[in-house]
Image: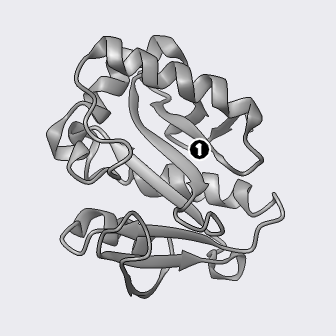
Amino acid sequence: MKQLITARLLVREWEVDDAAAALAIYGVEKVARWLTPAMGEVADEASMRLVLQAWVEDQPNMLPPRGRWAIERRDTGEVIGGLGIRLLPPYEEDLELSWQLRPEAWGHGYAVEAGEALVRWAFTQEIDELFAVARPSNTRAIATAKRLGMAWVGETDKYYNLRLQVFRLRPSDLSDH
């Protein structure tokens, strides 16, 4: 998947030159505190460039629907967030949908708009479910998972050695709007 277009957004592959915009997402404590331990907060633009370089290099080798994508506003061209689909540790059987937005973009429905486009595409790639995980205190992520139509399936410490709320989405859960 090279890109997806929604009413307000473009979901596209990351580029190394997105480092400054990506740092405004992954280098901000308000966002980074919710990232998985493997990611953590990115310290500076040079470090962000290295992260993006790794993502760009990995992308062609990932079996669809896995990958990482930038969320860009169509009206301004500004990168406001990121989306990912990857295998959840430790067993690498379950596919996780994740989203991160810069704090200034919170509360505008961008995560749901981009997420819906991505999951609709993902379900054309011979998968039958996606999961999202969130710390119990991450009320924004939990609300976004619910707005995406994901069903709460319980709490576990199976993933990332953290106590997490688990949500699941199947193709039959998608609304027709």
Residue 93 to residue 87: above or below: below
Residue 86: image location, x then y, percent: 59, 53
**Nearest the camera: 164 or 117?**
164
Q: What residue is rendered at 15% in x and 40% in y?
A: 29
Q: What residue is rendered at 26% in x and 63% in y?
A: 140
Q: What residue is rendered at 38% in x and 46% in y?
A: 38
Q: What residue is rendered at 62% in x and 63% in y?
A: 92
Residue 47 to residue 62: above or below: above
Q: Quadrant of the N terminus?
A: top right
Residue 151: image location, x then y, percent: 49, 84
Residue 3: image location, x then y, percent: 68, 34
- Within 10 Å of disc 1 (Cα), the crowding (few <14, some 14-19, many 20+) is some
Give the number of marks. 1
Residue 113 to residue 104: above or below: below
Looking at the rendered structure, the kind of residue marked 1 is: Thr
Res. 96 image quadrant: bottom right
Q: Secondary structure at mark 1?
A: loop
Q: Which residue is mark 1?
A: 6
**Nearest the camera: 86 or 126?**
86
